[in-house]
Amino acid sequence: MAANDFLAETPENFEQKCLCVLVLDVSGSMIGTPIQQLNEGLQRFKHQVMNDEIASQRLEVCIITFSGRVACIQEPSLIHNFDMPTLKAGGSTALVDGLRRAILKVTTRKNWYKQTGQPYYRPFVIMITDGEPDADQDVRGVSQDIDIRVDNKEFLFFPIGVQDANMDVLRQLSHRNTPPMMLKGLNFTEFFQWLSNSVSVITKSKEGDNINLPDTSGWGQIAI
Amino acid sequence: MVVGDSVIGLNHVKNNIPCQDSHSYEELDNGWGIAIVADGAGSAAYSHQGSQFVVKHGLPLFKKTIEENKWIKAKKLPDQAKWHGLAKANLKKLKGLLEKHAKDNKMDLGQMASTVMVAIFSPLGIMCTHIGDGRGGFSNFDGEWKPLFTPWKGEYANETVFLTSDIWGEKEVDNFVESNVINEKPFAFTLMSDGLEMHSFECSVWDEKAEKYYDPNRPYKKFFQPVVNGLVQMKQNSLTDEEIKGKWNKFLREGNERIKNEPDDKTMIVGAYFPN
């Protein structure tokens, strides 16, 4: 018996979009093995998402880096539409400025989705840092802003600490529903494998779902 | 004739979650009948039980309404206002029954959250009502396919409301319960959960003039016409109802690559009037 006894054709519908903003620390402390591992992880992430038919049609990735300065090195785009950049490390840690840029990017992209009539998922912001924010960074201010915006369901926020990251700062920044995670060693490869699996879950979920993200034990531990 | 089924989506299989969709239908006298579909909330632990409860207890409520109003004998459909009032009262009663069931079983009502869609079909036209997302459509004898109602969507894709949601206040309820009387002789109709909407409805297409995407909420004729023709042919070839249902189940599971890879649960009921 044929699977399609009814010979039905399906329409061409535009896929809903899911924005993921990666906010990555490329300060001086990331020089050497950390930045190398992070770059390898990013390549793996791209490869994994491209192999997922639904996620690759729905996920838009935006990459913001911060050191002494903040740069949006990849505007929101479907994963097959850009080459994953190779990051270079150096400079200080303008962490809060990086987050502020990410929040702005989320707002701008959501407005664009609305203006162009594109259905979309709740965006998510993932920040990875290994250090201490510069002294002039207003951690408290951005932390309050994140809390309000996450409460208002504007986006989801996941802070990830690496090596010598100041976990007190990450705890302050994080929303109560998503406490910070600590990367085990430099397991970026496992982290991005997890992220691509999570993207796969998120882009196929319903809004309001209690999303059971994949097990994090391969790369992370809850920061205590 | 009517055929329908609910099959589990890929994501639910992978995550060991039961199929949260349910459906039921019953053919009555003189070409009348009732179809009902419910889609349990992914975030609610017992929504599969909620959706099963909704179809099991919802169908008799609407059947009773048909009998009490003698529509079949009178060969008449009610007007829009009367139908909306009756439909709303039935849905509220259904919510009350679910509430009692949850209380009796020491369960949280929110954990049984489910959408609901109902269509009463007849040779005269169709009455429908719904809360939440999902799609419904019908075709007339000129082969035109039209929507039965508009799915309720929030800001985010697949964000919706449920029978159990806080929507029953007098002022806001009409923003969430939609009821329509279609006074047009139907050739066929359909009800479905949102797991199948991207595969059978035009719901996100480019508007050249406005230069933006929009949801025309249009049943895709190239999907439904072959489906209805296939059903008619199977019936004319004397396939039993069980054989047709088997083919329908296989179609919903793996009718084409996109349907096969759909992460969400998939429910579709299709009915057609055809020459004996």
Image (cartoon, helix red, strand yellow):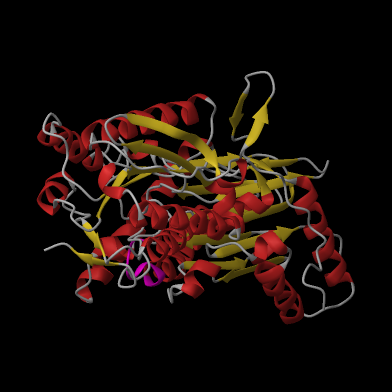
> Nearest the camera: A61 or B57?
A61
Q: Position of residue B70 (x, y in %)?
A: 55, 54
Q: Quadrant of residue A192?
A: bottom left
Q: Is residue A40 shown to the viewer in this render? A: yes
Q: Give the x, y percent position of residue A75.
A: 48, 33
In the image, is residue A174 above or below residue B63? above
Query: How many numbered discs, if any?
Result: 0
Task: Determine the residue located farthest toward the top in the rendered image.
Answer: B209
Residue A145 inside the magenta-drawn segment: no
- Picture quarter with the C terminus of chain B: bottom right
Question: Which residue is depicted at the point 22% across and 58% down?
Answer: A163
Residue A159 vs residue A149, the one in the foreground: A159
Quadrant occupied by the N terminus of chain B: bottom right
- Which residue is more in the foreground, B107 or B97? B107
Relative horizontal placement of residue A79, taking residue A181 as reference (left or right): right
Q: Residue at x 18, y 40 (%)?
A: A147
> Whole-percent x and y of residue B145?
73, 42
Q: Which residues are magenta?
A: B43-49
